[in-house]
Image: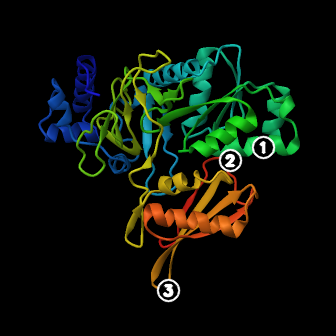
Amino acid sequence: MQISPKQLELVNEQVGRLVASGNYFGRRLSEAGVTEVRTAADFLALPFSEKQDLRDCYPLGLSAVPESEVVRIHSSSGTTGTPVIIPYTARDVEDWAEQFRRCYEMAGVTAEDRVQITPGYGLWTAGIGFQAGAERLGAMCIPMGPGNTEKQLQFMVDMRSTVLGATSSYALLLAEEIERRGIRDQICLRKGIIGSERWGRRMRERIKGELGIQIYDIYGLTEVYGPGIGISCDAEDGMHYWDDFIYIEIVDPVTGAPVPDGTFGEIVITTLVKEGAPLVRFRTHDISRIIPGACPCGSPFPRLDSIQGRSDDMMKIKGVNVFPRQIEEVLQEFPQLSSEYQIRISHLEGRDTMRIYVETDGTQDFLDLADAVSDEVKRRIGFTPLVKVVELGVLPRSEKKTRRVFDERYE
């Protein structure tokens, strides 16, 4: 999707703000001789920014405003390496709340709803984003935060919560607990706003079916406000994103060259009005595509497809490049298997080995099913994994994000 004249104007203002601030990216633009952006060609000539750039700015080298204008900081949820600190101005906070309000509205949430918020608060952007958007909409917030499933279910019943904000992993855990306790008839949920991790069709259907709700896939990242920059609609055909706040381009992950609409590649985001930490051509490493054409829901906002994975989560096994989603796509071909799986890669006796653990409903012999999955991986991807089929509930559940890939070669 080519950048519009209005978006170019906003990018030019962002470039001016960065250069005037003299922050990390402002200095980089000045050193490259960039003072303005007037055409699409000018924009595409701007350098990419990467997460490592943001780490190099620790703690507040990203700030493009005087410290007196910074009202809040957030940090990305990663647990390794130097933290990424993102400063927010009062306007940034308001703009983020407005985007999240639009997300709720797109999902059909109203001021009459009661929103139970289970993602984390604090430095992580999730919980406070869910809350700010709901308050701006006028809905009742139930700011539970993560964990304490016993209390989550008590409040869900007693407060008659109608909307659940959660990671897909925790939404599934709650669904399983509700089923196990036999309290589904006491639950008033009608919608789920789910985000923060990639999740497949099988998991989506399980959550929808077991909770009996409509679910919406929300998109965002701490570096660019947080969750709420895009959400799916009732058409369930991609996520609308707010192109008056951000410009999204899709590029080839290897070459960095733009790809046509409809082609999968890496999401690159430019913030159009952000004050505290403007980002220009930020490589997210998330893989998706821009869906061309109008959405059946009638919204004029453009659409991203669901996140397919990350350009940096590729595994190399026996000389074959493999993405977790490829394994997931194989598992989805077997209706006897659940949404829960785990991949472990190790180096034994001079060779790499992939073990796949996956849960089943028990309608087929475990050994026969394991052989069938192994054969299908071999046919599609080109190597033979060791497959272990286990009973439902054996694999760990998470109150946050579920880790599915363990590369023990480097641990």
Specify the farthest residue to the bottom: 349
Residue displayed at 71% across by 57% down = 360
Look at the numbered discs 3 and 1 and tell me whether their residues touch, using CB distance below 8 Å: no
Disc 1 marks which amino acid?
Answer: Thr
- Single out the mark in the foreground, 2 or 3: 3
Nearest the eye: 80 or 189:
189
Q: Is residue 363 left or right of residue 271?
A: right
Residue 140 visible in the shown view: yes
User: For mark 1, does the 10 Å Cα neighbourhood hold few (<14), some (14 to 19), or many (20 or more) residues?
Assistant: some
Residue displayed at 61% across by 18% down = 108
| Between discs 3 and 1, the one toward the N terminus | 1
Where is residue 288 drawn, in percent x and y?
A: 40, 40
Residue displayed at 52% across by 19% down = 102
- Its colouring scheme is rainbow
Disc 2 marks which amino acid?
Answer: Glu
User: For mark 3, does the 10 Å Cα neighbourhood hold few (<14), some (14 to 19), or many (20 or more) residues?
Assistant: few
CA separation in Å, label 1 and label 2 = 8 Å
Q: Quadrant of residue 60?
A: top left
According to the picture, the residue beneath numbered tag 2 turns out to be: 399
According to the picture, the residue beneath numbered tag 1 turns out to be: 149
| Between discs 2 and 3, the one toward the N terminus | 3
Where is residue 305 drawn, in percent x and y?
A: 44, 35
Q: In this view, does 25 lie above or below 367?
A: above
